[in-house]
Image (spheres, grey):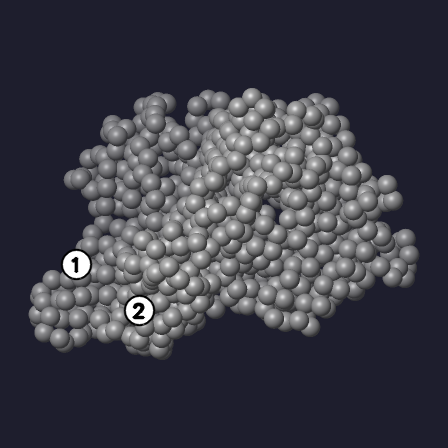
Amino acid sequence: MRDAPYDLAVDSGGDDFPVSGPTPRLSWKPPSDAAHPVAYEMQCTVDGVAHSTVTTAADGHRFLPWPWAALDSGRRVAWRVRALGTDGDSPWSPWHAFESGLLDADWRAHWISPAEADDRGYGKRPAYALSARFQVPTGVRSARLYATALGVYEAYVNGERAGTAHLTPGSTSYDRTLHAQAYDVTAAVVPGDNRIEILLSDGWYRGQVGAFRQPSGWGTVLGARAELHLAHEDGTRHVVRTDGTWTSAESAITRADLMDGQTTDFRVGPGSERPVLVDQVEAPAITWSSAPPVRIVESRPAQSVRRLEDGLWIADFGQNASGWITLSDLGPSGTRTVIDYGEHLGTDGDLTTTHLNATRPGQAPVPFVQRDEAVSAGGDATFEPRHTVHGFRYVRVRRDGAPLDPASLVMRVVHSDLRRTGSFSCGHEDLDRLHEIAEWSFRGNAVDVPTDCPTRERLAWTGDHQVFASTATRLYDVLGFSRKWLRSVRDDQLPDGRIANFSPDGRRIKHHLDDQFAMMTGSAGWGDAVVAVPWELYESYGDREVLAENWEAMVRWVEWALDTARTARHHTRVERSPEPLPHEQYLWDGSFHWGEWTEPKVKAADGTRIDPVQSDPVAWFMADKGEIGTAFLYRSTATLARIARVLDRAEEANHYAATAERIRDAWRTEFLSPDGRTAGDTQAGYVRALGLELVPEELRQAAAARLVELIRAAGTHLTTGFLATGDLLPVLADTGHADVAYELLLQRTPPSWLCMLDRGATTVWEDWEGVDVNGTAHDSLNHYGKGAVVRFLHTHTLGLRQRPGSIAWESFEVAPVPHPSVPWAGGTHESPQGTIAVEWRTAGDRLTITVDVPPATTARIVFPDGTTVGPLPCGRSSATHRLLSAAPVAGPADERRRSATRQRR
């Protein structure tokens, strides 16, 4: 072997460097020229001291438990690995460095809080500067700052900002989980007098929640905790800690709110300093996040800046995204610049945000506002509002009495710094663009947690990540990001086992069970995320621990749903039979469900679009959604059985597998007719029934044919919504209707994906007609759920998917589903084994497929007629086969795809 193992990593996040707990897990990728290593050998140094060499099995390159003694706080670790083979050993990998954080038991700093003179209310409070001075008598060899907060903070040493992470410490369920950050501030510390400062604002902890801007319920007093560990050149050590010697003052940030925006008055000098309050907050144990930090990942100049009138400009950055703008031209002293952010321009060319107003039947709308303000003190200061975040493509800039330099406006794109792991391109420009806007939509909603939109609600709804997780894993490494979020899902779980609608849950519904929203908690398709997301992560990355750490929460959720199925009935079934029929104990129909959600709005005779939820909320609330609920109950129970097998829980595996079969039988009894029609007879219902294998084999063809009939009856348009859209095209292709799948994919009239493109979308919309034919915007223009369609581009157009039973891409196949409008496709996937690359092209009636297979991986090619080539060797392989010209029918390749889907589910 000439190549070394590579891509070494620990299962922790970090900013300047990875930061772990005492026993991180180790991962790497096999040497690119090692088909099957027989073992691996590892070496490690801790603070420069070598540890013993460790040998592990060949399949132990993913999430290897820490093989040496548990780390103490603040240790600096370097480790490397080489592969051992029968034909010789590989070279050693480069050293990979990380540090253990300051462990909770070793924190000695006090919690400090600002002395607030008054409370200006939610959305109106300032940011506070908490500071202290310290002396450094000798040269500093290294300086590590460990910090966290209840609120959002930035840390500075002698005016230099620590690290590149933003919106720290991140969004968690602060009653149970709080993460700290570590920074290398060696370069900022000087001999003699030094100043350390923490700039602290409300953030997620004490800010506003959701579309109606309700007060966050985590706490009413902000807090910060920090330790600066100094190692001097003479060998001595010194620690500066937050304590009663620190002072607090209001900062130049006179208003800081994550939702509404930030105001900075550069004329405001340091406020009067007052002693901090000490130990006035309660906080959980400090831990270290598994997620990558939120960072500025891109800077974009304005594509155009138009003056609407004197003192009013509109800047277009060309892309809807999350973040903020920087403004380097603030004008003469006293100049006030007001910046409003939004996704859309009205027909008059001015910014409009009315489509984002929060509305409830019978109540006045809550106006949507994203507004930053800067007041100049003269000079060359730059305004950068780092204590808020916005969703926007456009900004409206208002300024009286001073010109605006268009070049001074720059968009900062801000979100979790996820590592890209997948790519896709093809010979159809619109499909490439669709893939691009889906990526942008997910990125804009990956700001430390997976939100629904970066504007109106900005909540980490469980359903959104549930429907998109299997797409996200094809685009980015979302393991650490999702594990962090799942911890909040567990933290917020209600006492009876229900999963909160969104997590972190700043409304803290688990403590307000009499709230109306609590009665709307526990829905199929939303709560099921606690089962579906860990399973997707396990299949994609091979991380068994993500199943183990969520096991208890999964069981509590499924058991609550099973108990609800047994004890609660929908009123229509009570009217049908006062006593429940035998199968009804497995129908999940008697509790609240959101249902399919965001289906295309119905057009009235006058052309207006009607939302059934808004037009008749009582009827929507009371409707029978048992067909959906029972389908998801089957999926979660069957998945729980598979998880139990992975975790060596044989008794639970058998129990939940048998229960799942009874649920499926009940679904068939209640919702499936002998001719293969479902009770609801909707596109979404057939997608679920076929995709989840609820329909028996002998009725699958009839059910698929009925799905196609409904699509044709809608003018070859979809009518699916939130839950089923991502599976619509795969289900069609896997049941022999790939032609219909592509017709829907390439449809240009609404509701369709390409209609979004034609109407200027740069991210995926919440409403299928987020911008209507008149140019009027509706609902959020950055809602990534419907972007799950791009999974079809990877699994079917490109044809790359895991084989049945494969974990972490140890085995895959390439089985493209070509279409005349797509002459070629190419893509990559950075798997835990290494890089998979696929390209196929058609020339006349010939299809040529080229595949790069990483080491320790098995692969095969499956042509559309079922002809199979493989197993493929490690490295590059190509194969050519004649395409059939007949109309698409369910053939061997379709059956293999469907079998793979069935076994994975």
The local secondary structure at tag 2 comes to strand
Q: Image point 75% across, 50% down: which residue? A: 694
Q: Residues within 10 Å of mark 1 (few under 14, many from 20)?
A: some
- Whether residue 835 sits left or right of residue 815 in the image: it is left
Q: Position of residue 343 (x, y in %)?
A: 46, 34
Indicate left or right for 91 with 703 as reference: left
Relative to 232, say whether 267 is above or below. Answer: above
- The quadrant holding residue 5 is bottom left
Disc 1 or disc 2, which is closer to the eye?
A: 2
| Residue 379 x, y percent position in the rendering | 16, 40
Pointer 2 residue: 43
- x, y percentage for residue 564? 74, 63
The quarter of the rendered structure image containing the N terminus is: bottom left
Q: CA distance from mark 1 to mark 2?
A: 33 Å
Q: Residue at x 56, y 26 (%)?
A: 846
Residue corresponding to mark 1: 188
* Residue 250: numbered disc: none
**SS class of the residue under badge 1?**
helix
Please name the amino acid that badge 1 sits on: Ala
Please give left or right for residue 111 compared with residue 773 in the image: left
Query: Residue 42's spot in the image, x, y percent?
Result: 34, 67
